[in-house]
Image: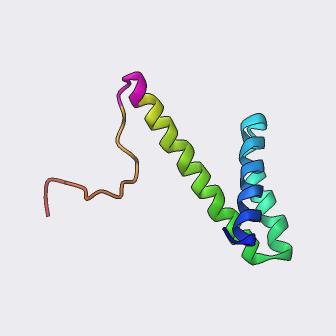
Amino acid sequence: MSLLEDVADGLAKRAADLYIKTADESLERRVADEVGASSPTLQEAFQTAMRIRKAEARGHAILDKYERGDAIPKAAISSQPQDDGGH
């Protein structure tokens, strides 16, 4: 990874860990705003890293459900073609 990606992912990991502990939904935005004041490039990389970490967590949650034998709901947004029954 590049220095930018390393720094952004480090911030994203800390923010994600703190969110789990505090449930402070404003934390991600506040960190993004703060780093963006000095580096818009780092801000965008941080936001991307956060999206990746959130998606990873969702993926793990689905895999955990699958392992337990729970029903797995369809994703709200899917990358797979949708069959809407019409044209």
Instruction: Please name whichever residue, 1 or 69, is drawn nearer the observer in this view of the structure.
Output: 1
Instruction: Please name whichever residue, 84 or 41, is drawn nearer the observer in this view of the structure.
Output: 41
Q: The C terminus appears in which quarter of the rendering?
A: bottom left
Q: Is residue 66 visible?
A: yes
Give the side of residue 18 with respect to residue 60, left or right: right
Query: Which quarter of the figure has residue 18?
Result: top right
Instruction: Please name whichever residue, 11 or 27, is drawn nearer the observer in this view of the structure.
Output: 11
Query: Which quarter of the figure has residue 35?
Result: bottom right
Highlighted range, magenta:
66-71
Extreme left residue here? 86
Chosen colour scheme: rainbow
Query: Which quarter of the figure has residue 73?
Result: top left
Residue at 58 percent of width and 56 percent of height: 52
On screen, 38 above or below 12? below
In percent of width and height, residue 36 lies at 79, 72
Residue at 69 percent of width and 67 percent of height: 5
On screen, 41 above or below 62? below
On screen, 38 above or below 87? below
Give the side of residue 37 with respect to residue 23, left or right: right
In percent of width and height, residue 32 lies at 76, 63
Q: Is residue 26 visible?
A: no
Give the mark count. 0
Residue at 66 percent of width and 67 percent of height: 1
Extreme front residue here? 1
In percent of width and height, residue 17 lies at 74, 42
Residue at 42 percent of width and 22 percent of height: 68
Instruction: Please name whichever residue, 34 or 69, is drawn nearer the observer in this view of the structure.
Output: 69
* Residue 77 on the magenta span: no
